Image (cartoon, rainbow, N blue to C red):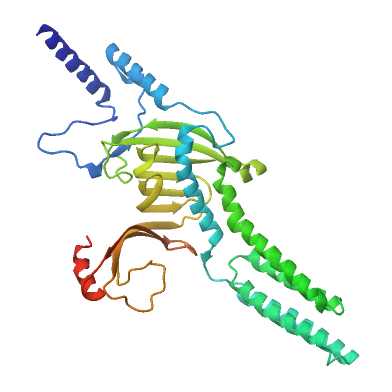
Amino acid sequence: VKRSRSKSQGQVQRTSHMNELFSGEGILDTEESSGSKMNRSSKSYRVITESKENCTSSSVSQERKELLTSNEEKNFTSVGYNPFIAEDKKKKQLTQTFMHMEFRKLKRSSSGSYRDNPRGSLWGISYFLVFAAYITYQFYFMQKDQEWNSPEIWKEVILETLLTVVLSYASVRMQTFANSLTLFWIYILVTGFFLLEQNTFRYLFAADLVCLICTWLGHVIYYYIGPYILRESRYCFGWRRVKSRLVQYDEEDAHVIPGANDKDLREVVFEYRPLTKVITCSSPNTFVYRGEWKDGRPSGWGEWRDDSFYGECLNGFWENGIPRGPFDSVERGTGNIFTSVAVGYCSMRNDDWKCQPFAEISRSLTYGMAYEECAVSGAYYLNFPIHTEVKKLRFRCEGTSTEGMGRILPHME
């Protein structure tokens, strides 16, 4: 009995010491009334930032010192710079998340956005003037040399006309000045080649073939080889783990996590340097994740911040290291805002959502849930909206699909 009493008294004393340690400093408020609990949706987390000098009693100071020392040894270990994503376990666990966010940046920057082209009339007039000069030159020498019936001349004129129409339309539709200017210079060079070279039709096939090969090579490099190199990130990025630490639950950042006092919350900060910045000797970029953590990956409610130009400040729900939704995201360099919401859908067809429907398939119904991401402010990128299907179910109805939809819709919630 004496031994059990002394043990219980020691536990009470230790609990009182921990309450003194955590009370009044804002680390973690655990006092709740017996009749009601604190609303979980009004809580979030805060990193432990206190030092041992705030404690007054010697026992509390010693206990805090031991606690912080163990936390530093366990959670604040850092890894030296490694130019490859290699042997570190935490890096491997975060590779999927990091590469997914990098591909989001790549798609936005490569696809471009919808916008008016204020130089469309300028490009149209420029092409018209060059084409008028070419036609005037050709007809002058055709009349001078009496070569009206020469098939080579007319083939060249027809090809020049088609080239003018195609390139002028492409330049007007281009979203960037550099692309339009490149096409215009190509047009100038081809037209000059036509004007300065006699009997040039035999070279047209070779020239078109070279242009076709260069176009396809550029397409393959930009859309396939580039993403492949980015996917094999050990050739492009050098990571250095700055810190990875546990965080405590608080009420100040309720907009980040609606409520997760019983889950693993972490803050992970990484520095990375893309290959382009290594070549240009630019400063490295940093991304930070703060939120719920499961199996070494972001899972649950959390916030992602990337300080690169196309980096995101994404706040929402994560699943297995991927932001699934709902979430809100702000692009750092441009200020564009994206949002993803859950949408329930019901279709009168039992096929994929990307197909083109032509007729109703009787006694067949598809319903489920998907996340739709779209731009709500700023530029509207060409790859939006982004459709991510989460759950797809099929329902075989006795009557028509319309009757089956009437039975399903009341139960969509």
Q: Which residue sits at x=32%, y=19%?
A: 64
Give the answer, above or below, for where 109 lies relative to 16. Answer: below
| Residue 264 appears in the rendering | yes
- Residue 128 in picture, x, y percent from top left: 70, 81
> Position of 392 compared to 277: left or right?
left
| Residue 306 appears in the rendering | no
> Position of 339 compared to 262: left or right?
right
Give the answer, above or below, for where 214 lies relative to 297. Answer: below
Give the answer, above or below, for where 12 lies relative to 154. Answer: above
- Residue 174 in picture, x, y percent from top left: 60, 69
> Position of 140 compared to 318: left or right?
right
Give the answer, above or below, for where 19 lies relative to 406. Answer: above
Q: Which quadrant holds the N terminus?
A: top left
Q: Which quadrant holds the C terminus?
A: bottom left
Q: Which residue sits at x=17%, y=17%?
A: 12
Quarter of the image for residue 120 reads bottom right
Which residue is nearer to you in this view: 224 or 280?
224
